[in-house]
Image: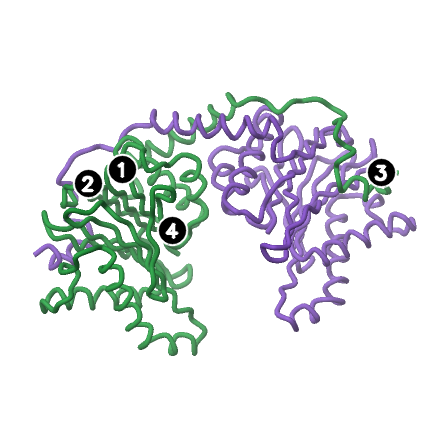
Chain colours: A purple, B green
Amino acid sequence: MTYCLGLLNRQGLVMMADTRTHSGVDHIHTNPKLFDFSSLGQRAVVLMASGNRAATQAVLAMVRRDLHLEITPNIHTHNTLHETANYIGDKLRLVEARDRIHLERDNFNFNPNFILGGQLPGQPPELFQIYTQGNHIQASYETPYLQLGESKYGKPILDRGYRYHAPLFTAAVKYAMLSMNSTVLSNASVGPPLDLVIYETDSFVLSHRHRLQADDPYLVKLQATWGEALRQTISCLPDFPRQTGSSNLGVYGSLEDDSVAEG
Amino acid sequence: MTYCLGLLNRQGLVMMADTRTHSGVDHIHTNPKLFDFSSLGQRAVVLMASGNRAATQAVLAMVRRDLHLEITPNIHTHNTLHETANYIGDKLRLVEARDRIHLERDNFNFNPNFILGGQLPGQPPELFQIYTQGNHIQASYETPYLQLGESKYGKPILDRGYRYHAPLFTAAVKYAMLSMNSTVLSNASVGPPLDLVIYETDSFVLSHRHRLQADDPYLVKLQATWGEALRQTISCLPDFPRQTGSSNLGVYGSLEDDSVAEG
């Protein structure tokens, strides 16, 4: 399994991916799922991948080949990030045409997915999710995050608190970390080291790129502080009104049916 | 979809279930998923159900019939809750023998599941999960909760904070409410009204039974207070160290591969 998360933010982008890959529980490896294709000072372009590793690696190999051979278009020639998303989708469709039937013949799903984040000059930072089918959607002010893979465990914290206008360094990064941490704690197939990119609008350089190990002091401190803060917060929440012999038994649907059970 | 949650606690049990059922998004109804089969002052027995409603209703109908006709065994005659769990499992297997092949012929899954919670005299409160196959597992001190249905959204809050020794009224109930609230916010097919039972050890009576509507004042207040508290807590967490030109680029696996992209 995989968890990749991209946050669209007023001040930039946060992109985070775990690195655990496995074919069954006895075949666990570390492989990067976050890839930097930026062109220093000119364009910020970051890809994150989930699903069949053979398929995502094939897409990345074709992207690199086009760059290496200076084929046009390549990932440095597009005028908009929307075009780059289409370009990745086109590569996905080439891999799909080559591999899908062979996978499905042996009951494997063909399921690669990508998140593309970055910024081109004169345009705001953008975040796209590129589906297995090669089409894509874009994060927005109202829906300021995109996820790949094991997305459910890390979603409530984002829905409750993360907003487009949250400060990038003092809030957005923490939401990304906690969303990732919730997922790592709940699914053993999502795990560290964790790759993190914090991109600041109009910088056109990925100056904040980190690989966080399981014992990273900040991660360890964040997890402990957060757990303790949650428990304290719970105890400060208003208590549930403790009346006995609840007055709303009459509308308690199942009880009427089961009144025989109280005889 | 469904979300049912049972918390095993030093001071008793908390059981909570949503009531939304649907066959597609245009066919949404309210149906109870929490059923009280307690015998006042003698035994506390509560069932929660997920999966095919036809199957779970068939099981409940047989349980009620045995009680009504005073057949032995019935849900009031077992000496342990383990026997009651087996009894429910036996009913499930009868329904399975009757219906499964007909469902699967039309590509429906046969997937009923139950949580059984309660207490019998001389024994501690117990909590069981009864699988579609009729077998069951039991919650424990180390794993003090069980879930049915849409379980992922509401799991991180429990893993981070809920413990067997948490005070029943001032903590456990709040964890159950927040776990349910996270799920309701994330999955439109899980929804209010919400059924809640708080059982106190050795009381042998379900004195705290509530059906909470969407506009229940406590629920509304809890959700608002929690959201605000989370945002405040985030801002108090230590900030991510904001150095630029990260020193650990060398171990940033994907970057070496993609160095061509920076040329």
The residue that disc 2 covers is B201
Left or right of A45 on screen, residue A149: left
Tags 4 and 2 both on a single chain: yes
- Residue type highlighted by circle 4: Val
Q: Position of residue B143 (x, y in %)?
A: 38, 44
- Residue type highlighted by circle 2: Thr
- Which of pointers 4 and 2 lies earlier in the amino acid sequence? 4
Tags 4 and 3 both on a single chain: yes
- Residue type highlighted by circle 1: Arg
Under tag 4, what secondary structure?
Answer: loop
The residue that disc 1 covers is B10
Q: Position of residue B1 (x, y in %)?
A: 39, 56
- The residue at the point 34 percent across, 24 percent down is A236
- Which of pointers 1 and 2 lies earlier in the amino acid sequence? 1
Q: Which quarter of the figure has residue B57? A: bottom left
The residue that disc 4 covers is B190
The residue that disc 3 covers is B262
CB within 8 Å, label 1 to label 3: no
Query: CA separation, marks 1 and 2?
Result: 8 Å
